[in-house]
Image (cartoon, rainbow, N blue to C red):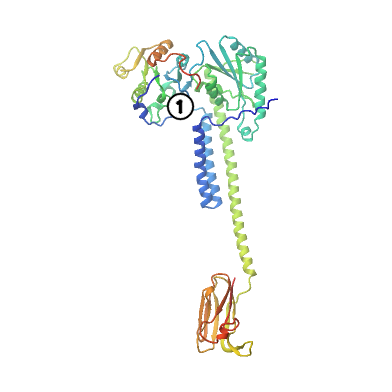
Amino acid sequence: MSPARAPPVRSPFHSEQEAFRFVLLVILALLPVALAATLGPTWLALVVLAVMLGAVAARVVQVRMRKLRAVEMPVKMAPPHVGSASERRVLIVANDTLGEEALLNEVERLASVPHTHVLLLVPALISRGARLTGAVDGLLDQARVRLKTALDRIGHASAVAGEISEADPLQAVEDTFATFVPDEVIVSTRWERAASGLEPRLAGLVRERFAVPVRHLVFDPGAAAHEPDKDTEARYRHESGEVAARTFGLKALAGAGILAAVLMSAVALVQSSERREARAVSQAAAEQAAALPPVAKIVDLSVIPEYKPGPEGEKHDAFTVTEFTVRAGQPQQLRIDNTDSVPHSITAPGAGVNIVVMPGVHTYTLIVKHAGTFLWFCTFQCDEWAMAHPGYMSGYITAS
Amino acid sequence: MFSKGPAAQARALNLNPQPWRWSHPRVLVEHPDEAAGLAIASGLRYAGYAVAVCPGPAGHERCPLTGPAGCAPAHDADLVVSSLGYEHEAAREVLRELRTRYPDTPLLVEAPPDMDESLHELLDGCHQLPAPASTEQIVATVQSLSGHVAGEGPAGA
């Protein structure tokens, strides 16, 4: 048993140049967003993204509106005829009218003419929404069933071929000009467009672009096919183009509103989460500060010779306070009464502290830049034993 | 096959976005009447040419050929068949631009029988067919100018 073949994947681009241009545009559009995200806050990146998306959307809307309003495109083109001079190739574009008896009779009539090849092209009419969500199988199946039913009904199998297309109908016709190379095109539609039917103005669009005869077969419910005159078709095309452009404009406006609302919500969300984070950080800092031991505004102490007894029972020189607790980076006032006749010091090289304590009562400022516990000692020659022992002429500074 | 000289290729123009999609010998047909233009196009297609049909100034608010944007089909055409009449100045301007911008592109003009002196001067050096010319006459003249015979070109795009 042969394995089931996957349906061919159609490239959305029609040339390498087009694909390259698309990639280049995407890179250029993302560059400012990436720069804003790297150098600025998140909300700025979102705003830049919104501006870029808005610019792209505005351009798409402009192009689409122009297409719908059918700006004149007066130069028609066509490739050379393929085959012998007696051969004739007819392209029939239809979808919802494929079951119409009159159309099938016309196909049969054309196919019965010698050297005439007929191609039935059935665009699957996949909406943008369906394309985005990937829900295309149902529409493709519908087109396939319609084509198969029509081909089964028509004889002259060798002269009539069928093809379904996932592309936009006009694009599908354009693609067929590169493969089947028709000498004539027949577009079959209803006068009023059905949900799953071809747009009636397709005939006019094909006629404007291609330098081959284009016939428009219109089917009214319960009536035979007819071909509208040029003025009627032009008027209808203009009206339907205007209606389609207006509808699209309203949809685009609504879409822009929704997009703006979503983006504004995203910016607000990011900003509020940033604010919440900042609040949490400052709250944590406040809590941390509150958890630290209290620091006195000013510490009073004295330096007294032969003040404190050592373990051997002899009295030694000493500071009355030898443990200092400070906040890193914050000044701490020390009011020191040096009762000795010579200077002493509080010197802590690890903390960058060197306070020379002059005889008498003076106020000094102790600042430790970094957190940690640092040993301090007196550098002036006094009681040697006391200078080497914390609690006497030495001690610790704890900065938190 | 026709040839285009360096003068035409060196010209850097900002063209409007309607380039040719086919690489066969390409003929631009300028005709104000849609049906007549299509008939000539059909004859040329069966003779093996890719065709573009333009109604000339009548179909545009302003012909891009006479503006800075230029006209892609005219720029890349291997031969131009012009049947614009030439009673009006706009049509003569198109002819003048074609001759100035693309001096190396052969130009076949359906010339009116009663030409004034300025038109006579303008058409000097062009290949002319007396108007009204039939499709067969036009196709035969294009073939003789290009040396191309029907069926020579490869099929498809």
Quadrant holding the N terminus of chain A = top right
Q: Position of residue A250 (x, y in %)?
A: 58, 35
The percent coordinates of residue B125 (x first, y second) are: 31, 18
A186, above or below B14, in the image: above
Amino acid under disc 1: Pro
Q: Residues within 10 Å of mark 1 (few under 14, many from 20)?
A: some
Q: Position of residue A292 (x, y in %)?
A: 63, 71
Q: Is residue A380 above or below residue B41?
A: below
- Residue A110 visible here: yes
B154 to A298, vertically: above or below: above
| Residue B138 in the image, given as x and y percentages of width and height | 41, 13
Of residue A22 and residue A187, the one placed in the foreground of this image is A22
Q: Residue at x 67, y 22 (%)?
A: A145
Residue highlighted by disc 1? B19
**Residue extending furthest toward the front:** A1
Closest to the observer, A360 or B5: B5
Horizontal arrangement in the rendering, residue B136 relative to residue A191 (left or right):
left
Q: Quadrant of the C terminus of chain A?
A: bottom right
Circle 1: element type: loop
Nearest to the observer: residue B38 or residue A164: A164
